[in-house]
Amino acid sequence: MAPSTHTVTNQVPPLTGYDVFAADRALAEAVERHLAPGILDEAREELGGLGRSAGSLQAQRWGAEADENPPKLRTHDRYGNRVDEVDFHPAWHRLLGHAVSAGLTDAWGRQGGHVRRAAGFLVWTQAEAGHGCPLSMTHAAVPALRTDPALAAEWEPLLTSHVYEEGLRPPAQKAGVLFGMGMTEKQGGTDVRSNTTRAEPLAGDGEYLLTGHKWFCSAPMSDGFLVLAQAPGGLSCFLVPRVLPDGARNVFAIQRLKDKLGNRSNASSEVEFDGTWARRVGEEGRGVRTIIEMVAATRLDCVVGSAALMRQAVAQAIHHSAYRSAFGGLLIEKPLMRNVLADLALESEAATTLALRLAAAYDADTETERAFLRIAVPAAKYWVTKRCTAVVGEALECLGGNGYVEESGMPRLLREAPLNSIWEGSGNVQALDVLRALQREPGALDAFLREVGTARGADHRLDAAIKDLLTELADLDGAEARARRLVERMALVLQGSLLLRWAPPEVADAFCASRLGGDWGSAFGTLPHSLDLATVVERARAQEG
């Protein structure tokens, strides 16, 4: 018999059974803005189906199960033979299969593909973020492989397939494959030019044997990997398949899986190569140039993934506040909580709007848009991924003690939040990359300034911020020490410009007043009280289905 000491009241129902895509007005509007009318209805239908799946109780359970049951490494079979396999919980395979079938590895060959994929990635990541790693690597491998038409013809149809097949078999026997990447080594980390892995040429054209290690190898259960190694002609890019065409296992010794802060459903590994067969991708000595397009695409996914984490955290915070009562009324009606929620919503919408704008630039693929991406991607990656941890932490606090409990799902979001700031080049790397583009590629700065200048005259605070930015950009001597401050300002000016053009006036006004005009404190919830914060919060609220 249940005890009768009290009756449970004032607890918030779970945010479930809703369309994650349709409930995100900023995302839905971005998709409508950036897609051609002829494909918009089809894209909405696809994203709506994915959104309803992401918001379902089933997908939410899959996410929790995948996180609670991290992958396990099996180095040997029962007889002592090396197998180097990674076992995943069934929930991981269900999440990954649903993502692949939704086209989240298929962007490069269809109209509006990058916008559609980015929107889908943003939606589905909210169910569980860890399995986004192999999705991102598989998607991003395509431009690197296209430097070798023969390799691209062999692998691209499998990489962009909508069929997920787990297990290691010769690629020709599979309807779809996944790719990983291995660049960093123990002694160098981000400094990949200090790599020591050797590549010795074989008689066959473009064939090599690799000897060495990778300190971080992403998604080791994948069918193939792009790696860097030192060939006779210098640092080069190679494709390493897990299974050779004759069915034999390639030498790919997984030494251990990383025990990470978050991203626990995903396997990150240390691997050893010892006579490992590989095919060269691109020219010898041009490995970084070959793989850089893959890195750029994964950096964009870091922006999209962070936007997804922020969106889910803000949706949970607003949902909680809309149901939880305290001190005589709902939390969402309290002026101070409303200020916090509105502040968080601004950060989330700015991140989403910027992420989809970058995806649209990939789809356009013009010289001007490529130049714009050269600066905008690292600047966005620097800023958006750094804001993610702060946003998720504040959103967790909105739930109070309930948010600190695993059952709420917020701790999983918080553990995941710092990852995208570290993966694919941490903050300093991104800031220095922007500086490099500013100093060596004047066309990139011109394209960036044209983009932010589109909204010039719409708000005096943006105009002043652009003027200050131009002053800073006029003198880049000694810029390395102030690179973070400069890149932060560039990202904020870009976000402000986009919101002034496309967001509701209440959102753009609040963003410009706080982020550009300086009428803001050092913590969330310090927006000017005179703004229309209720409208900002209501726009960001996820309405259950």
Image (cartoon, helix red, strand yellow):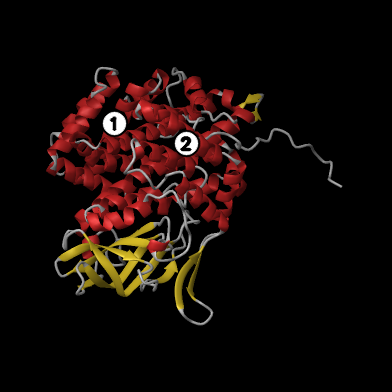
Callout 2 crowding tier (Cα within 10 Å): few <14, some 14–19, many ≥20 = some
Looking at the picture, does residue 377 appear above or below residue 242?
above
Looking at the picture, does residue 166 appear above or below residue 367?
below
Q: Nearer the viewer, mark 1 or mark 2?
A: 2
197 or 100, which is in the foreground? Answer: 100
Q: Which residue carries the number 1 mark?
A: 494
Q: Is residue 104 left or right of residue 71?
A: left
Residue type marked 2: Glu
Callout 1 crowding tier (Cα within 10 Å): few <14, some 14–19, many ≥20 = many
Residue at position x 40%, y 56% in the image:
178
Q: Earlier in the sequence, mark 1 or mark 2?
A: 2
The image shows residue 15 at horizontal and vertical percentages of 60, 36
Residue type marked 1: Leu
The image shows residue 156 at horizontal and vertical percentages of 32, 53
Q: Which residue carries the number 2 mark?
A: 46
Q: CA distance from mark 1 to mark 2?
A: 29 Å
